[in-house]
């Protein structure tokens, strides 16, 4: 009985429109892509007004970052550099903190801190904030609007990332499809062209990323792509080493492709072909895993939680994606371009795809837990929302693959018994007679055409074009005559269309800040945790004016070591000219409003003129404490001054 293929054209069009709209929505909000590391704290903090100039500016990040001598710049109100240019590594344990020293004698006013660095998973990050010394002022600093990793260079680098993933899938998946599912495909021209184009795409994209890496993480100027000094600096980074290793492995991949479509395709002896197939399979797996490892070693898997487990899992995930989507691409090309594809090849690929989906599910669950970490991050962060879209597309893809599998089973069904035996022999004989008559007619027609071609070269070219068109139409009719094959082609085409969108979403995910890190950064920014507190004593200046005689001055307060536990408190009361001022009484109170702690009173002892001290001042917990100092300059003149400081 003849089976009619389902009409998926309208459904395919709707699916493509929906996928394009969804992808457009995603990509419209994806640029510039967030990075893995995030700024979680600073000292001074954004918008702070400090009484005296700090000795240095510290920045704290959620993940490890790569600092260069110009990564942190502090600019005075006139736009001049106020820092020494010497980056200090203040990292301790899990705390990632860097600082830059400030020049001495800085005047009052508003200062701008501009920073730019590269996170451990290769993505550039940048930002700026201000703080003021004494009092806020106007500033002439105008920071560039370009975001790190944005602009033309960022767009070109992003395109190269997409192309590299697609090229890897086609190269690895296509080679696996030929070796494991369809050995005869090694001699089919369209299959060869598809796999070679995958290699060319991956190689070209890798070279482009290597050249664009310096301006992508630095100046943002396209002209710097050919700066040899910048290229040398890139080669010394983890990402540069990964890209260079990928190029070397692609040289080995070129040898694999040459042997696959050369010596392997020409082998006729079954034993020799089997031995060569084993060698190609083993070597190809090693090379493919190595290329996948260049992503795992340089991006999300290499940093954060459990990198030792995450990197092998990421390699397996990438290989499974390539085996499924790359093999699907070559199968689609074969169904449309190749004269015929054996049913056994389609069946074998169906089994390979099923195994790849199982690996994708297992590795995807682990990666989702590692990068998201909580239900709130799954729905409340961009990474989690993209992950939900990816899961939805995977479900759609599996559903379409199930339809393809049904068509594959129909292709594999045996013919009814009525079509075998004598009837089949009679049919073959009749076909033979028709073929003989057709051959004689073709010979006569060819002889006539040869005569015409000899007489008129223009006519010969016209006849050649006609013959080519007739041959193409005949091959198309032969392919379309099989309804099961036509149905399989339509379902595979739909599967490939959804797979393209899925691959694009996956690429966006690799350049988006994971949900776990985004939530941690938000908590670190909102709360005053120890990661954002400098590891040094608290020193503040508090001007006062009680309104009476000798009522003006400054209180210099020092809390050492400025951490939780016991601290030594020193107070120095000075006149406006800097000389010590003796006052009848001075009191201190500490309050942590976020935890409803305090006020905790401190009664310092007078040591000498203008100097008061208290030992063993207990700070019970870290946070942003309000320090209130009450100064009494006479029996009736007193004032209370206060300031908020972070204490770890």
Image (spheres, rainbow, N blue to C red):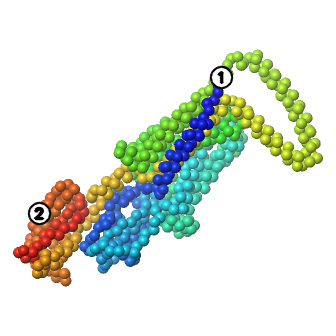
Which residue corresponds to the image point at 62% horizontal and 50% vertical from the top-left? 199
Mark drawn on residue 83:
none
Disc 2 crowd, CA 10 A, few/some/many (<14, 14-19, 20+): few
Which image quadrant is residue 402 in?
top right
Where does label 1 land, which residue?
414
Instruction: Using the rendered image of the protein, determine whether residue 379 is visible from the camera's viewpoint.
Output: yes
The residue to which callout 2 is attached is 601
**Position of the C terminus by quadrant:** bottom left
Going from N to C along the chain, the mark reached first, 1 or 2, is 1
Above or below: residue 42 compared with residue 200: below
Residue shown at 63% from the left, 24% from the top: 413
Q: Which residue extends farthest left?
A: 635
Label 2: element kind: strand
10 Å neighbourhood of mark 1: few (<14), some, or many (≥20)? few
Q: Label 1, label 2: how many angstroms apart (C-alpha)?
A: 92 Å
616 left or right of 57 in image: left
Horizontal and vertical percent for residue 60? 34, 61
> From the viewer's perspective, is the residue at label 1 or at label 2 nearer?
2
Q: What SS does tag 1 mark?
A: loop
Say left or right for 415 vs 519. Answer: right
Marks 1 and 2 close (CB-CB < 8 Å): no
| Quarter occupied by the N terminus | top right
Q: Residue 312 location in percent, x, y?
A: 46, 46
Is 267 situated above or below 545? above
Measured as percent of width and height from the top left, residue 596 is found at 18, 55
Q: Position of residue 314 (x, y in %)?
A: 47, 46
**Quadrant of residue 614 in the image?**
bottom left
Is there any visible trace of residue 90 in the rendered image? no
The correct choice, above or below, for 268 with respect to 76 in the image is above
Look at 43% across and 69% down and name the residue there: 143
């Amino acid at each position: 009985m003849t089976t009619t293929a389902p009409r998926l054209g309208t459904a395919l069009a709707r699916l493509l429109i929906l996928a394009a709209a969804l992808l457009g929505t995603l990509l419209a909000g994806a640029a510039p892509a967030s990075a893995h590391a995030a700024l979680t704290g600073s000292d001074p903090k954004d918008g702070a007004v400090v009484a005296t100039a700090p000795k240095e500016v510290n920045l704290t990040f959620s993940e490890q970052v790569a600092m260069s001598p110009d990564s942190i710049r502090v600019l005075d109100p006139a736009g001049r550099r106020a820092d020494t240019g010497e980056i200090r590594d203040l990292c301790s344990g899990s705390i990632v903190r860097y600082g830059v020293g400030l020049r001495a004698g800085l005047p009052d006013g508003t200062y701008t801190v501009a920073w730019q660095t590269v996170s451990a998973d290769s993505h550039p990050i940048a930002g700026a904030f201000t703080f003021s010394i004494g009092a806020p002022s106007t500033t002439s600093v105008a920071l560039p609007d370009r975001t790190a990793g944005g602009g033309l260079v960022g767009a070109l680098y992003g395109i190269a990332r997409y192309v590299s993933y697609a090229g890897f899938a086609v190269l690895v998946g296509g080679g696996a499809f030929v070796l494991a599912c369809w050995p005869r495909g090694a001699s089919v021209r369209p299959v060869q062209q598809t796999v070679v184009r995958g290699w060319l795409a991956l190689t070209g994209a890798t070279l482009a990323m290597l050249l664009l890496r310096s301006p992508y993480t630095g100046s943002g100027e396209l002209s710097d792509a050919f700066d040899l000094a910048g290229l040398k600096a890139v080669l010394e980074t983890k990402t540069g080493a990964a890209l260079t290793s990928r190029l070397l492995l692609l040289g080995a991949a070129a040898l694999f492709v040459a042997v696959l479509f050369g010596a392997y395709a020409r082998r006729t002896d079954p034993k020799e072909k089997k031995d060569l197939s084993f060698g190609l399979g083993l070597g190809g797996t090693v090379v493919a895993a190595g290329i996948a490892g260049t992503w795992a070693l340089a991006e999300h898997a290499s940093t954060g939680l459990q990198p030792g487990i995450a990197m092998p899992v990421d390699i397996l995930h990438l290989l499974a994606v390539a085996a499924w989507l790359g093999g699907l691409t070559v199968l689609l090309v074969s169904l449309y371009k190749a004269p015929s594809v054996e049913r056994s090849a389609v069946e074998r690929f169906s089994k390979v795809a099923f195994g790849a989906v199982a690996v994708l599910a297992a590795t995807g669950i682990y990666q989702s837990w590692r990068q998201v970490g909580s239900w709130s991050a799954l729905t409340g962060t961009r990474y989690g929302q993209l992950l939900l879209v990816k899961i939805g597309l995977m479900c759609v893809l599996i559903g379409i693959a199930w339809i393809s599998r049904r068509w594959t089973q129909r292709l594999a069904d045996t013919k009814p018994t009525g079509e075998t035996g004598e009837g089949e022999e009679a049919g073959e004989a009749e076909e033979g007679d028709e073929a003989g008559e057709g051959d004689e007619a073709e010979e006569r027609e060819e002889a006539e055409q040869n005569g015409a071609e000899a007489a008129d070269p223009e006519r010969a070219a016209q006849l050649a074009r006609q013959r080519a068109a007739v041959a193409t139409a005949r091959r198309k009719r032969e392919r379309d005559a099989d309804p099961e094959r036509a149905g399989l082609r339509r379902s595979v085409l739909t599967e490939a269309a959804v797979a393209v969108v899925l691959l694009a979403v996956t690429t966006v995910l690799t350049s988006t800040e994971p949900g776990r890190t985004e939530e941690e950064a938000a908590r670190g920014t909102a709360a005053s945790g120890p990661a954002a507190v400098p590891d040094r004593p608290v020193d503040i200046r508090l001007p006062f004016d009680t309104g009476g005689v000798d009522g003006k001055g400054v209180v210099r307060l020092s809390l050492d070591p400025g951490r939780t536990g016991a601290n030594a408190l020193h107070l120095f009361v000075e006149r406006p000219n800097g000389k010590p001022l003796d006052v009848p009484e001075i009191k201190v109170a500490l309050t942590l409003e976020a935890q409803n702690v305090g006020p905790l009173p401190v009664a310092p002892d007078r040591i000498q003129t203008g100097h008061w001290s208290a030992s063993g001042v207990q700070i019970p917990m870290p946070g942003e404490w309000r320090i209130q100092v009450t100064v009494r300059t006479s029996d009736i003149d007193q004032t209370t001054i206060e300031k908020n400081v972070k204490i770890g």
